[in-house]
Amino acid sequence: MFEVYTDGASSGSPGWAGGGVFIKNGSHVDRYSFPFGIKDTHEAEFLAVIKALELLKEREAATVSLRSDSQTVVQAIEKEYVHKEVYKPLLEEILTLSKEFPLFFVKWIPSKENRADSLAREGVRQNKGMKK
């Protein structure tokens, strides 16, 4: 089973944004940080999940347990619905990618348990040098 933590961060809303992905498969751990340019925090959260699912697809994962501290993202995935138009294409991509895995679970976790938090903040820092 792949245990995956995702997080998104933004230095404003909108502002420079980044995402973090922490993947644990048995004793093997991978950590990723991604710069997302100018986004709001929720967009960064959705984009971090997309990045995680793309990485898991490359690994041909079968069982995925996704954990996020974003209630917006977790509820959107569980309900397969998000109210704001700007997030709808992101949710659709997540739902499409999640169907690639025979077993896919999503769980909300408190921020203090999110192993991807520092990775998301690193993604924000990776935006330096980019133009707004």
Image: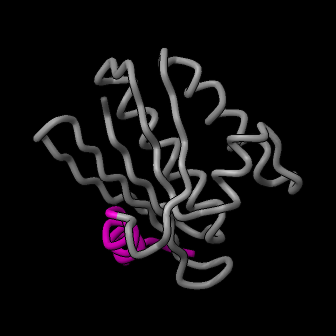
| 3 vs 131, nearest the viewer | 3
Image check: 25 left or right of 38? left
Residues rendered magenta in the picture: 115-132
- Report the colour scheme: one colour
- On screen, residue 73 above or below 27: below
Horizontal and vertical percent for residue 32?
28, 54
Residue 43: quarter of image = bottom right
Residue 126: quarter of image = bottom left
Q: Which residue is drawn at 49% across and 61% down?
A: 109
| 73 vs 13, nearest the viewer | 73
Looking at the image, how many numbered discs can be counted on the residues? 0
Horizontal and vertical percent for residue 101?
48, 19
Image check: 110 left or right of 25? right
Does 8 appear in magenta?
no
Horizontal and vertical percent for residue 26?
16, 36
Horizontal and vertical percent for residue 108?
56, 56
From where the camera sits, is residue 49 visible?
Answer: yes
Q: Which residue is drawn at 43% across and 38% down?
A: 65
| 69 vs 47, nearest the viewer | 69
Q: Residue at x 52, y 17 (%)?
A: 100
Q: Residue at x 50, y 72 (%)?
A: 9
Indicate the quadrant containing the N terminus: top left, top right, bottom left or bottom right. top left
Image check: 108 left or right of 42? left
- On screen, residue 26 above or below 38: above
Indicate the quadrant containing the C terminus: top left, top right, bottom left or bottom right. bottom right
Most distant residue in the left direction: 27
